[in-house]
Amino acid sequence: MITRLREKFKTSYILRASLLTVIVRFTGKGFSFLFRFLVIHILGDFIVGVYSLSKDLLEGVYNFAILGLNVYFMRFMATRHTQEKRQRYYSYIISILLTVGITLTFFFQLSAPFIARVILHKPEIASPIRIIMLSIIPWVFLHVYIDALRGGSDVVIAGLFDTSLIPILNILLLLLFYKLNLTHYIGIYNIISVISVWITTYLALLYFQKKFNLNVRFSLNKKNKPNDLISFAGKVYIINVINSIATIIYTLIKGRFISLITLGILATNQRLLTILAIPSNAVYNTIVAPLVKAHEKGQSYKMKKLRIKAILLTIALMIPIAIAMLLFKNIILAVLGKNYIKYGYIFIWQMMISFIGIFLIPFEITLNMAKKQNALILYYIIVKLILRTIVALILIPMFNVMGVILTDIIILIISVITVIILVELKYNI
């Protein structure tokens, strides 16, 4: 049995890369949990809530800034091209991203007071919003490099930059600021986050340049523009814009009706439960390149086989983690504080949401890789933008924090059903 598993590990790229990525992500999550524990006990739940709300806004803005170019570049790096062509495309793509990133950063430096005071009715978070938006540019570039590494089948190192390095830097910076007695400022968590992502992005850039022998050269010359940039990345950008609008609206609704402390608790619970996402991220990242190759060859049966294998492997890896978390739930929440024990039932519901999400990711990846962005655009408009906004406006004011959980579950179930119908029935891919 052990010999068989060893041989399987040697011959199966998906299994080998998935397990190695799981190890990297588990290590990263361990540091992430340690950091969140230190943040809660050093900075307090209120500052955690301030960061969580402003970070949610950042994630919505990030999709505007990335322009869908990370997905395009990942797909581009997964196929063979000349070095000269890679350099030209890379120069053009990073030039666009830098221009958009600077514009959005400037916009939110001006609009942060209005967002905090008028929309959220929380004027105290204007400064933290301004601080967190300084990380728009590094976050955009970091994900371009991470996705490019995934496209180049370097998923383990991509996982290192994605999950491990930032929490380690966060811990070091938090302890440094604590030693200097600088942890009382309301935006200190945001400052730590911004510094960490800038450092991580720089290190990712160095590794990316060494691996692919590509240099930072900025050029908006139309001769360097990829021929299929508009047809592929343009549609991905529309999806990201819609998703951004949906995320920002949903964040503003939660920020308007739920207290900052409660938002911090929700975010911490979700951070704890990201350990459940380690198997899915590890497995699904490894199937991107094989999916692209299978689609290029018209092997729909192979694409289906990859999805089924990925889902089953993810479930098998997640179940032991979920059982362990349930067994030690009370101990974990007690360590975090009494507020977390109070919302212990929310923890269980959020765990259920994580399992439902297993079935969504491989089908969304398939639609993206198969260039079915038109279907995704319609799905995002109807489900994530219109429907989630309506459901959230009804349930969150009525049920408060439980309204968030109910909204997430309802929309996620509808999303899973929708993408399965699109992939299996409409396009049969």
Image: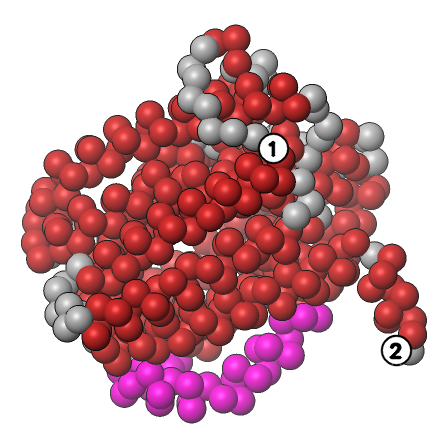
Residue where numbered disc 1 is placed: 213
Q: Which residues are magenta?
A: 316-345
Magenta region, main secondary structure:
helix
248 above or below 269?
Answer: above
Label 2 vs label 1: CA separation?
Answer: 40 Å
134 above or below 400?
Answer: above
Disc sitting over residue 300 in the figure:
none
Q: Residue furthest top?
A: 223
Disc sitting over residue 2 in the figure:
2
Give, as a three-letter code, the residue at label 1: Asn
Q: Position of residue 409 (x, y in %)?
A: 46, 61
**Residue at horizontal 13 percent and vertical 51 percent from the top:** 127
Q: Position of residue 11 (x, y in %)?
A: 87, 57
Q: Quadrant of residue 170?
A: bottom left
Question: Is residue 188 visible to the viewer in this orientation of the structure?
Answer: yes
Residue closer to the observer: 117 or 288 = 288
Would you say 9 lies left or right of 322 here? right
Is residue 326 shown in magenta? Answer: yes
